[in-house]
Each structure stands twice: as C-alpha cells, then as structure tokens.
Amino acid sequence: MKRLLLCGAGALAGAVLGCARHADVPTYRVAPTTFTRRITAEGNLKAVKATPVMAPHDAPNSLKVSWMVDDGAVVKKDDVIVRFDSSDFEKELKGGNEDRTTATNDLSKSDAQALATRANLQRDARQAESELLSAKHFKFDDAEVFSRYQRIEAEVDQGLASEHKQNAERVLTIRDGLNRTDKELLAIEDKKAALRIRNAQQGLNSVEIRAPYDGILVLTRDWRGDVPRVGSTLWPGQPLGEIPDLSTMKAEVFVLEADAAGLAPNEKASVTLESKPNVAYNGKITQLDKLARPRVRGVPVQYFGVTITLDKTDPHVMKPGTRVRAVLDVENRANAFAIPRQALFEKEGKKIVYRKHGSKYDAVPVEISSSTAGRVVVTKGLAQGDELALIDPTAKKNES
C-alpha cells in the first residue's frame, strides 16, 4: 500500500513538473502574412547606349599611344581624343617610296639592256644569214676548178654560217624570255613597294581618333583594372573606351552567389547613388548572369552579375561609373505562413515543428520553400492558429 502511494506521488510530481516545463516554452501562433525577401548588392552605373572607341581597324599593325585625353573628360564632336605615334609609319612611307624608285629605275635599266641585247643579237642573226647566202651563192663544187681543200672549206663555211644563224635566233628567243621574267620580277618589287606605301598611308590616316559626338570619354579597364595610357600599345580593333549616351542609364551590380537563389528577370529593384543615398530610383532586373564568377582576380568569392534598368535617369547626378547600392525584391508572397527560424527543427533528416496540443507538443513534419535570415516559409504541414514552440520541448525535458 505504501509502495502504491509512493508511485502515485511520483506520477503527480512528474505531471506538475511537465506542466511547469511547458509553461516556460515560448510559442508562436501561425497566421498568414506577407513574406518579402530582399537582398542588397553593389555596383556601378553604366549607359544603356554607348558608342565604342576602338583602335582603327584599317591600321596595318600595332599602334602606340602618344597622347590622349583623361578618363572621364568632357569632349565635343570632332575633338581629337587619342593620337598615336606616327614615326614608324613615316619611316615605312619613306622606305616604300625608295623601294618604288629603285624598282622603277631597275625596270628602265632592264628595258634598255634588253633593247641593246636584242639589237646585237638581231645584227648577229642578219650577219649569219648574209654569210649563209654568200656561201650558197658562191659554190666551190667544181672539182676541175677548185681543189679538194677549197671544196671542203666551202662546205664547212656554209654549215658554220647556218649554225651561226640558228644560234643567234635561239639566243634571241631565250633573251626575250629572260627579259620578260626580269620585268615580271621588277613588277613584283614595284607592287611590294606600292603595298608598303599604302599601308604606311593607312597608318598615317589612323593616327588620330576623333569624338563622334558630344559626351564623356570612359576608358576601358583591363583584367587588372588599368586603363590605356600614353605609351600603351593597341592592336587594330582593340577597345579603347566608349562615349556613353547620358540620357538613359542602367545599374550593373554584383550579388553574392549565396544570396542569389530566386533571382530572375523582371523582378523589382531600387537603386541609390553613393553620392545621394537618400534618393531611391526604381527599376527592374533585365539581365542576369548564367554562371557566377569572381570579381577580383585571385579572390575565390563568386558573384552573379545583375543588370537593372532604371525607370528614369537624372543626367544631373547620374554619371557612368558612379557607385550604387541596390535592393532587389527577390520574393514577395501574400498570405504565406512565415514562421520564425527558431520554430523549425531537424530530426533524422526531416524538417519538423513542435505544435502545441493541449498541454503537450506534437512533432509535425513540414515542407519549406523560401527563407531569410530570420524567417522560413512553410508550404505544407501547418494551419492558421497553430501554436508552435520556439525551443525544443524534448530537449528541455531531457535536461530536466
């Protein structure tokens, strides 16, 4: 009997302790609310439309900058903004003119020599033909009048005159072919000189770049963040900078890879200038990088590039390159069950909450979707009015 009384007393004490324990558990009552997830990003302003400034495409080779205006300088239409070194092109033009003069002189010399050689060979051919005719006309074939020696000598002279004529004609044909070859080679040298002159003249015509219209020159930065300067070497077609149209601006910002979940085009955003932080300019996301990439060489932190098109542009305060801070509305849900993150627990790989049921707390599995640093959206497992524990009641029981 005493043992039963002691057991009953122990159970009563446990119930009292349990009530006291649950009374100390802070709770949260579930109710539909508007869930908004915003992330911040930093970047710079950039013109929507800009005319690129590039090294001339028709330059024959590399160009060295000898003078240029400063980055961000205000330029007028047809103002010289970049001037390249012309000494190499001037030297090339002088060398090309000298080569062309040499080729012309050699061609004239070759023509004169060919003419003289042809005249000599023709004279030799005519003389050989005259000798052959004489040998045929005066024949020494009468054995009674001429001796055997004279008859043999006459035949030899006739054969020699015939060979002399044929040889002169062959040499004339060969010399004509050689002269044509020499003239073709000299013509090639003349074309090479002409090409050299043309390239030099193209280079001289490309030593200056002028502004296409009024604006601000924004120089292009390389992967090290450096801009072209005096002494820089540029290749034909290499970007040098741009002259933006200041009437329409956009913001290019960078979002941490860890914060980019849910980013999508057409979502709303607001942008504030670093120089004017109290004024916000509305816009929307129009472009988003497919892959994250580092912003700084050698730093492994990854970012997504995001382009925000602004609803309006204030040319008085908005300039290309101005630093901005953007707030992106990644998600905006109405009537969502957004519970405190403290009310969500994980047991055996499942997401659960502890829902109050009378004086007890039942472990209820739930499904979640979006979340912020302090709240989690539950899509399945809860109903309006549910009261959730903000600490683990079972953990407190074990501690007790």
Image: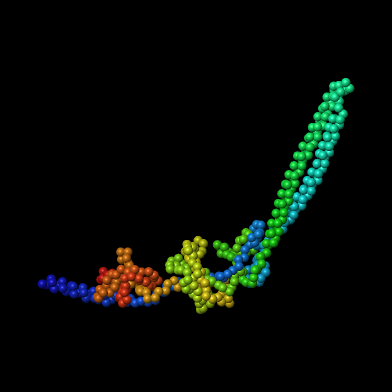
Residue 64's place in the image compared with 24, above or below, is above
Number of on-image labels: 0
Residue 356 is left or right of residue 152, and the answer is left
Q: Residue furthest left?
A: 1
Residue 293's place in the image compared with 164, above or below, is below
Q: Residue at (88%, 21%) from the top-left corner?
A: 144
The picture places residue 242, in percent across and down from the top left corner, at 60, 67
The picture places residue 397, in percent across and down from the top left corner, at 26, 70
Residue 167 is left or right of residue 320, and the answer is right
User: Front-most of 198 and 341?
Assistant: 198
Q: Residue at (72%, 46%) from the top-left corner?
A: 185
Q: Is residue 19 visible?
A: yes
Q: Residue at (70%, 56%) from the top-left corner?
A: 198
Please tell me in which quadrant of the rendered image residue 222 appears: bottom right
Q: Residue furthest right?
A: 145
Q: Residue furthest bottom?
A: 278
User: Front-most of 248 and 85?
Assistant: 248
Please tell me in which quadrant of the rendered image residue 383 appears: bottom left
Q: Quadrant of the N terminus?
A: bottom left
Q: How is the image coloured?
A: rainbow
Residue 226's place in the image compared with 14, above or below, is above
Residue 386's place in the image compared with 219, above or below, is below
Q: Residue at (74%, 54%) from the top-left corner?
A: 97
Q: Is residue 253 visible?
A: no
The picture places residue 255, in percent across and down from the top left corner, at 47, 68
Q: Quadrant of the C terminus?
A: bottom left
Please tell me in which quadrant of the rendered image residue 126 appears: top right
